[in-house]
Image: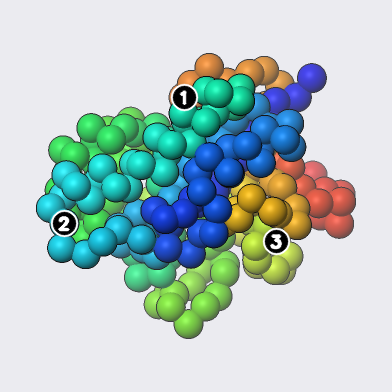
Amino acid sequence: MKYLYETHMHTSPVSACAASSPASQARAYKRRDYAGIIVTDHFTNGNSGCPPGLPWDEKMAFFASGYEEAKKEGGRCGLDVFFGWEFNVEGTEFLTYGLSLDFLLAHPDMDKLPIRQYSGLVRSAGGYLAQAHPFRTANWIRNPGAVAPDLMDGVEVYNAGIPDEANTKAFDFARLHGLPVQAGSDSHHEILPFSSGIALPKKAESIADIIDAIKTNRAELILPDRMSGQWV
């Protein structure tokens, strides 16, 4: 038996670009037989739906509300829900796991940090950092491409929302530098053309179990048939 986990997903209204509520997203993943999801809404320096002008603690309360609603629904429907976020630096984005709302509250205005300082802060606190879709191109990404490999713990090498060519570049980069790999749907809506993520050989009891599985290469990538034969 394999246990399926989503590593990259968004909810509305915390992520301004998302179209489905946290509860709807949780139910959708349960219907697809996922064991769990990591809610990675856009942080306040990204495409956030956070109202402007709020003090830091209120910003963080709004930010965490998507995760909290999804977790409540997960408790009702039997889906494990974990906390994460997608941090933005000039359009380049980083999935962050393993830290809590208390960490966010303790670091006001961390959304202004450059990537080297952010990486140091997260990892010194025991968090995990993976660059999301590193070779995606868009007019809002100032420096497209992967950042220095010493700044991250892993690489999202398959993202269901970007071209295969960009995903293949990410996979090649990760293998070149010996970095752990992961896949994710980058879901913004409960109706998905393809569900991605990772499959684990045993159920994760905590986000730490998911991080450890990725770091030790025990996380199988959930890939479409057109790509699954390429990456061995």
Question: Residue at 70% across / 68% down in the picture?
Answer: 163
Q: How far is disc 3 from disc 2 in space, using C-alphas?
A: 40 Å
Dot 1 or dot 3, earlier in sequence = 3
- In which quadrant will I find the C terminus? top right
Name the residue type under label 1: Ala
In the rendering, which numbered label is found on residue 54?
2
Q: Nearer the viewer, mark 2 or mark 1?
A: 2
Please tell me whether residue 80 is drawn above or below residue 31 in the rendered image: above
In the rendering, which numbered label is found on residue 29?
none
The image quadrant that residue 115 belongs to is bottom left
Disc 1 secondary structure class:
helix
Q: How far is disc 2 from disc 1 in space, using C-alphas?
A: 31 Å
Q: Categorize mark 3 by other alpha carbons within 10 Å: few (<14), some (14-19), many (20+).
A: some
The foreground one among 20 and 6 is 20
Name the residue type under label 2: Leu
Name the residue type under label 3: Thr
Q: Is residue 181 visible?
A: no
Dot 2 or dot 1, earlier in sequence = 2
In the rendered view, how is the structure colored? rainbow
Please tell me whether residue 65 is drawn above or below residue 36 in the rendered image: below
In the rendering, which numbered label is found on residue 168?
3
Disc 2 secondary structure class:
loop
Q: Position of residue 166 (x, y in %)?
A: 65, 67
Q: Does 11 sit left or right of 228 as displayed?
A: left
The foreground one among 206 and 188 is 188
Question: Residue at 48% across / 21% down in the picture?
Answer: 206
Please tell me whether residue 144 is drawn above or below residue 3 in the rendered image: below
- In which quadrant will I find the N terminus? top right
